Amino acid sequence: MENKTLFDKIWDAHVVKSIPNGPDVFFIDKHFIHEVTSPVAFLGLQTRGVPVLYPERTIATPDHNVPTIDQDKTIKDQLSRMQVERLRENCAKYGIELHDLGSDHHGIVHVIGPELGITQPGMTIVCGDSHTSTHGAFGTIAFGIGTSEVEMVFATQCIMQVKPKKMRITVDGELGTGVTSKDIILYIISKISASGGTGYFIEYAGSAIRNLSMEARMTICNMSIEMGARGGLIAPDETTFNYLKGKQYTPKGEEWDKAVAHWKTLQTDEGAIFDLEYSYDAADIEPMITYGTNPGMGVKIKDMIPTTEGMEGSEKKSYLKSLEYMGFQPGESMKGKKVDYVFVGSCTNGRIEDIRSVANFVKGKKKADNITAWIVPGSREVEKKAIEEGLVAILEDAGFKLRQPGCSACLAMNDDKIPSGKYAVSTSNRNFEGRQGPGARTLLASPLTVAAVAITGTIADPRDVF
Amino acid sequence: MAYDKFNVLVSRVVPMPAENVDTDQIIPARFLKATERTGFGDNLFRDWRYDSEGNPKPDFVLNDPTYSGKILLAGKNFGSGSSREHAVWALYDYGFRCVVSSFFADIFKNNCLNIGVLPVTVSAAFAEEMFAEVEKNPLSEVKVDIDTQTITILSTGNSESFDINAYKKENMKNGFDDIDYLLNLKEEIGKFAEKA
Ligand code: SF4
């Protein structure tokens, strides 16, 4: 028998039909939707006069544009309110499960899926959102789709896809203190660039990945798209099973044992071939930060912004344009630069472990006066835990403001915008121009680094601030 | 959603050499609040096109009357970032029917093919030549022929062939979308779903 990768095993098991010289008709197990990319898809269904084929396979939550204060009140922004109301109407009309604002399991779609145990190994999962790759941490094929495809999934539970190529990224060894999974992924992207993964689906492997918690693995898979990859996945193991056991939507009793027995087969066979492989040594990874306007523009915090040496033409022009937007010079040191905002949140780092790590770090300290510090939990469940564990009290003592769950300043569709020209060090995943508000300047880093920045008021290496 | 059939397009070219243009630039998130697919063209490249007061920035290519056309000639890694199909809706709504680049982001390319904007991947050298030609003569036209899968710079006669899979090619030529095809497979999908 042919040796297969984990990706092949899941992919091949979901092909309804292959079109010669064309895409595969690809079956989708679970479909997540939110208020921004679904309304036009629902409208399309209505125009065609077709129903949602398997409504029980779709789960909805409003997250992208919701306010993060006064969620119990009517949404002030009229357009946002309309999108959320449209989502409610559509879910009611088509019989789709909705985790609405204020309900116990409301949150960012990629946070609540795993939290509820909806995300399970071996599944295919899509959502009209590129960070759907997050769910790959459970050994799933999960990726973002466009609104036309959202409509396809509603109508037929399938999409048409050409099978991507396969890449494996192996990280072996032990991470140093102060180095987190966010640093691993920022390091990888800085090595292979914001487009280096285009056309590929990535499997992350190696001892440094194996040793990570589920939440830390989600941070890695989440940012696969920032290399241009469709998604990334990690083979399920005991860590995965322990995380999922007892969750609301996971199988119970005998069914659970059967599921685990199957999940254990979801491994890349010895000798399976990848189209491309990279390997890195965990010991070489240090706390990272981005300095430019794509996630590939990252350096170790202790390092300088790269000079333009060796660049020419449009590459050099684009590089300088990016630094100009950021207000930085080639060759400058990152450390010590003044910062205005910190943001802890998003589907990359808005989970309970992230909030714990920030709270542990700032306990008994105060944020710097020049810093506005926002903490936005990824879900209601994260919020609840953060309160119960006393983390919120610690953070508020340190001068952080806790807001209610949602995407918030990750994409600034609501009021949580960084003002033009200001610097924000964020735990989110994109530092594009204007991502956190028109003219906002975003630097991506780990929750630990963000905590260090909040305390010092400047770009700092968390290992220097204890 | 139905779109115009694509067969042969002859048009002038709008050059935008910046690399890594992400979908947040093509259509910023704050313009994603619509519940219908209309009016996105007005906000295409919003923050590059207008200042914070809403005045057009004269040095941005879409505000420069020298250039116009249905073909956008883009830099490397065009369309990275978010999966928002709104980015392609904005391009289509503005009047672009074809984007040419030496390198496209994946989801963006898929989205283009799903709604009738043809993504044409050319070699880096051919892209350079196109940029040089349009800079020299902004009126020069380019011909994109989906049937023969060729793109030709009419003033020089230089051409290159491009890839598109046979299935998507038929769709683009006929203005079909995937849902039409999938709806006909209901029975097979139903059998599959029972096992899944
Ligand atoms: S938190 Fe940010 S990246 Fe994640 S789903 Fe929301 S907007 Fe997208």
Image (cartoon, rainbow, N blue to C red):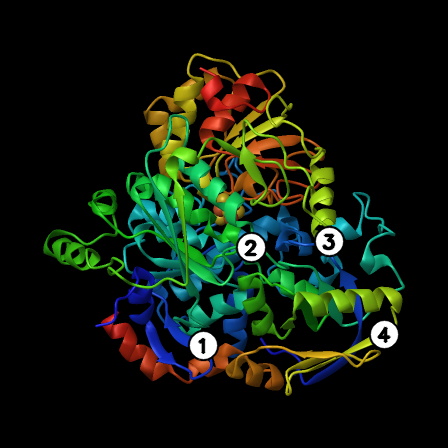
Residue B77 falls in which quadrant of the image?
bottom right
A171, A404: nearer the viewer: A171
- Same chain? Circles 1 and 3: yes
Tell us which disc is closer to us: 2 or 3: 3
Disc 3 secondary structure class: helix
- The crowd level at tag 1 (other Cα within 10 Å; few <14, some 14-19, many 20+) is some
Cβ atoms under marks 1 and 3 closer than 8 Å: no
- Residue at mark 2: C-beta within 8 A of ligand 1: no
Amino acid carrying mark 2 in the image = Ser
Amino acid carrying mark 1 in the image = Pro
- A325 relative position to A382: left or right: right
Closer to the N terminus: mark 2 or mark 1? Answer: 1
Q: Which residue is mark 2?
A: A195
Give above or below for A434 relative to A57.
Answer: above
Q: Which residue is mark 1?
A: A23
Closer to the N terminus: mark 1 or mark 3? Answer: 1
Residue B185 falls in which quadrant of the image?
bottom left
